[in-house]
Image: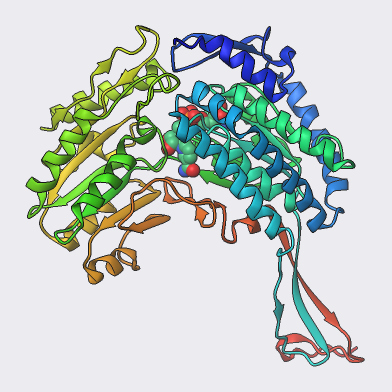
């Protein structure tokens, strides 16, 4: 049966409770990469409307910061419940709007549920330290307070999870959120807002404008970045975007969490379990059609096992199923748009010019649509790390290189501008530990015997260098959403000064 994507989109949006006025007759066309067709027309906001929304969010902040954190957690608990109820529909909408295969669309919503659970627990654990003081009769401690309005700018490839990582933490930390989703994925954003509004209705007395979505292009993102009432901007997207956003936020001393591009690598050592490595590499490099920030893009294979592993990998690449994620059991869906396809072809030509031998990479006809861009994932054997290998191309291209010396491969591993995710495949404890050590991988995520992508929400997520340095999601990432005060209380009858200073009047 052929699915009419536009009709299916309307059905899902209705079911998820999104107001038709927001997506049926608006000024901005929304397309599905599954067929390339227009599926909705969303209503964008003007810069002035965005400014008003931020002012309203600031009013909400004044009230929300006074609500006890565990009670704020109750709202996020309800959001988790609503997401559980909406999982199938929202996951399917993610597949339509971002082109992910169904199980990845559902997985993305599961990640939202997981972060809600995490944030609910966190709402009773926003701990500060009690610190030893050098002065008798004194107590020193830290308290963590809500920070202010949190602006969220997100990329197309994780259209809902990134919002939830930020929103769930921001809300329990006492902050309203204002979200500028990718202009390529506005519909899932509207759906998230509808789901949250159901949780808000059940919660009862939350302030108005606690969570808002601003549909628009980068100019609306810039309003968030420049507005004095936005205390923190969490921006996920390309390094190009971060280079523009970071300095503007720094100029007004606002906080930033920058989650930018990756150029992630794996090292396969002589002792590796090759069956396991093969599966991890296949998912890491081809999954989500190479459109994850954590996608495996560079692979270093030891010369002793190169001829065992690489032919098997090529076979996997040739046989992987590419197709319409809604109608087939394909493992690889479409690229987001024509620009992504053109960038991929450009990178492949540049790789050939550097002496690379390319297998795959050609366009695949799917559903006889000439407006959709499906590609056979490409595997490129490179004589050395050069040219396009040094950059992130947001498409399924895996550059494979042979190595012989472990120290040398560590250097090459780190010799790119990005520093997000990394993996080593080895059964040798010394290699594994070295990879995780101070002079091993320089990435924010370093794994052993699992791939570069598919992180869980319990750990802090983010990377170094041109990946931006931000951390969100688990561990103590919540601290970025709060302000810390150090308090010293004198319960004695004297006033001793620190460092033995005397100032007697
Ligand atoms: P993009 O940079 O084109 O857009 C991301 C968002 O930034 C969009 O909402 C866009 O409107 C906004 N934006 C762009 N320029 C802006 C500006 N000057 N001021 C304010 N907002 C601006 O990225 P994309 O193509 O949607 O996503 C792909 C990129 O995102 C890849 O580089 C990928 O690695 C990266 N990414 C990183 C992470 C991470 O956690 N590190 C996660 C997902 C995606």
Residue 410 position by quadrant? bottom left
Task: Please say which color scheme the image uses.
Answer: rainbow
Percent position (x, y) of residue 317? 22, 32
Q: Is residue 29 visible?
A: no
Percent position (x, y) of residue 209? 81, 34
Query: Which of 467 and 88 lies nearest the eye of the viewer?
Result: 88
The residue located at (26%, 24%) in the rendering is 376
The residue located at (86%, 35%) in the rendering is 208
Q: Is residue 455 left or right of residue 297?
A: right
Percent position (x, y) of residue 393? 33, 32
| Relative to 344, residue 10 above or below | above
Q: Is residue 417 left or right of residue 250?
A: left
The residue located at (34%, 46%) in the rendering is 417
Query: Which of 25 and 73 lies nearest the eye of the viewer?
Result: 73
Residue 229 position by quadrant? top right
What is the quadrant of the N terminus in the image? top left
| Relative to 443, residue 112 above or below | above
What is the quadrant of the C terminus in the image? bottom right
| Relative to 51, residue 3 above or below | above
Q: Is residue 193 visible?
A: yes
Count of residue discs: 0
Query: Which of 90 and 51 lies nearest the eye of the viewer?
Result: 90
Q: Is residue 297 left or right of residue 86?
A: left
Percent position (x, y) of residue 118? 63, 55
């Amino acid at each position: 049966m052929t699915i009419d994507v536009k009709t299916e989109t309307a059905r899902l949006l209705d079911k998820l409770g999104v107001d038709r006025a927001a997506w049926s007759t608006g000024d901005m066309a929304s397309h599905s990469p599954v067929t390339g067709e227009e599926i909705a027309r969303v209503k964008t906001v003007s810069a002035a409307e965005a400014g008003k929304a931020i002012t309203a969010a600031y009013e909400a902040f004044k009230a929300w910061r006074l609500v006890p954190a565990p009670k704020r957690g109750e709202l996020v608990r309800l959001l988790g419940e609503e997401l559980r109820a909406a999982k199938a529909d929202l996951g399917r909408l993610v597949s339509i709007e971002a082109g992910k295969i169904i199980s990845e669309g559902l997985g993305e919503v599961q990640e939202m549920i997981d972060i809600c659970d995490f944030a609910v627990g966190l709402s009773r654990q926003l701990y500060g330290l009690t610190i030893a003081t050098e002065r008798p009769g004194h107590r020193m401690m830290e308290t963590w307070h809500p920070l202010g309005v949190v602006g969220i700018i997100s990329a197309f490839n994780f259209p809902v999870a990134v919002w939830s990582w930020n929103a769930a933490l921001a809300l329990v930390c006492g902050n309203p959120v204002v979200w500028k989703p990718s202009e390529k994925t506005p519909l899932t954003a509207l759906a998230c807002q509808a789901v949250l509004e159901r949780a808000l209705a059940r919660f009862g007395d939350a302030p108005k404008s606690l969570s808002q979505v601003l549909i628009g292009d980068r100019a609306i993102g810039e309003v968030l970045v420049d507005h004095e009432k936005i205390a923190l901007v969490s921006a996920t997207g390309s390094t190009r975007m971060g280079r523009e956003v970071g300095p503007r936020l720094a100029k007004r001393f606002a906080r930033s969490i920058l989650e930018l591009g990756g150029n992630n690598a794996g090292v396969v050592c002589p002792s590796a379990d090759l069956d396991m490595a093969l599966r991890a590499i296949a998912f890491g490099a081809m999954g989500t059609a190479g459109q994850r920030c954590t996608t495996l893009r560079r692979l270093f294979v030891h010369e002793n096992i190169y001829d065992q592993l690489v032919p098997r990998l090529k076979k996997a690449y040739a046989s992987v199923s590419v197709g319409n994620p809604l109608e087939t059991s394909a493992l690889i869906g479409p690229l987001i748009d024509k620009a992504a396809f053109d960038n991929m072809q450009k990178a492949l030509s540049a790789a050939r010019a550097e002496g690379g031998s390319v297998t795959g990479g050609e366009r695949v006809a799917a559903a006889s649509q000439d407006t959709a861009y499906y590609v056979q994932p490409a595997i490129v054997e490179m004589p050395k790390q050069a040219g396009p290998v040094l950059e992130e191309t947001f498409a399924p291209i895996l550059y494979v290189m042979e190595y012989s010396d472990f120290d040398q491969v560590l250097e090459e591993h780190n010799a790119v501008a990005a520093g997000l995710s990394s993996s080593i495949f080895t059964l040798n404890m010394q290699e594994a530990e070295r990879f995780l050590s101070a002079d091993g991988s320089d990435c924010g995520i370093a794994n052993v015997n699992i791939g570069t992508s598919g992180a869980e929400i319990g750990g802090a997520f983010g990377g170094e260098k041109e990946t931006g340095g931000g951390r969100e999601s688990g561990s103590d990432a919540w601290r970025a959403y709060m302000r810390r005060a150090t308090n010293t209380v004198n319960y004695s009858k004297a006033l001793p000064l620190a460092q033995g200073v005397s100032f007697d009047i």
